[in-house]
Amino acid sequence: MVIGGTGRTNPMRSSSNSEAVLRETPLFANLTPKEMESLATRVSKKHFQPGEMLFAEGDACLGLFIVAAGAVRIFKLSPSGREQILAVEGQGNSFAELPVFDGGNYPASASALGDTEVLFISRKDFQNFCREHPDVGLKVIAVVGSRLRRLVEIIEELSFTTVRQRLIAVILRLAEQSGKPSKDGLILQMTMSHQELAAELGTVRELVSRNLSRLQAEGFLHVDGRKILIKDLPALKQESQGSE
């Protein structure tokens, strides 16, 4: 079985590891132990190095992927090479459900974020499994519907908000998740580079740097490399609503 990328693909000699991951996957949450064991026998496993491609937009769809460890970035590239991140899928998340059923090619590209391991189920095997277990097919519809809603949100953000607003929204979201209080404000240690942040915002690195500098000059932030000090969190929240 061949999957995109240069890493080695191995059929699972023991289904125990794959079953543990499959149990964490919403698509398969209600399967009985016997059904889970049957599904695990159809799974193969592959390891990807940081940045390695699982597949590229336009490649023929081979099957369904599930993240066993690490994370996978789903993205599109413009003709000029600008990147737009559509999603980051973590452990237990499935992806590439839509082309498995509609017969089309992969509509976006996927690459590994750090060392990543995925489970893979071929298109034919997954279709047959869904015929045997209609509840799984219904869950696929729910997952695809959720992804469609997120894509609509991305379109709205790109169409109706500025880079400044989107940047502030990301900073506020990350601050809520991992910000640490200090006597001077809220400290946020960014894990993304300006280039990676630009890809999430649907813009270019220069605009990210420019807007960070402006927010610092206006007194909202202090930026020191990837460390951001949010000086006035309420004012920054208000700015996210009112900046144009």
Image (cartoon, helix red, strand yellow):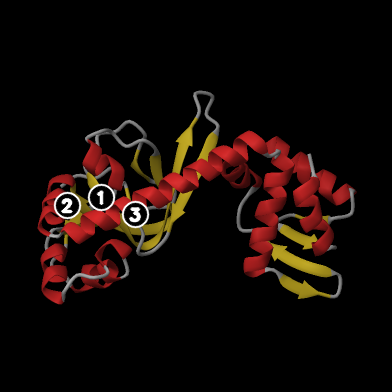
Residue found 62% across the figure and 67% down from its top:
177
In terms of secondary structure, where does tag 3 sit? helix
In this view, the mark in front (3 or 1): 3
| Dot 1 amino acid type | Leu
Q: Are marks 3 and 1 in contact (CB under 8 Å)?
A: no
Q: Give residue 47's position: percent from left, percent from top.
A: 31, 56
The residue positioned 70% from the left and 40% from the top of the image is 163
Q: Earlier in the sequence, mark 2 or mark 1?
A: 1
Q: Which residue is mark 1?
A: 64
Q: Is residue 58 visible?
A: yes
Mark 2 and mark 1 residues within 8 Å of each other at the beta carbon? yes
Which residue is identified by label 2?
126
Distance, label 2 to label 3, CA atoms, is: 16 Å
Horizontally, residue 213 falls left or right of residue 169, namely right
Q: Which mark is residue 37?
A: none
Q: Residue at x 66, y 46 (%)?
A: 194
Q: Is residue 60 above or below residue 132?
A: above
Circle nearer the N terminus (3, 1): 1
Res 12 quadrant in image: bottom left
Q: Are marks 2 and 3 in contact (CB under 8 Å)?
A: no
For marks 2 and 3, the one nearer the N-term is 2
Residue 46 appears in view: no
Residue positioned 66% across, 36% down in the render:
160
Identity, as a three-letter code, of the amino acid under mark 3: Ala
Picture quadrant of residue 117: bottom left
State the residue position of label 3.
142
Q: Is residue 206 above or below residue 193?
A: above
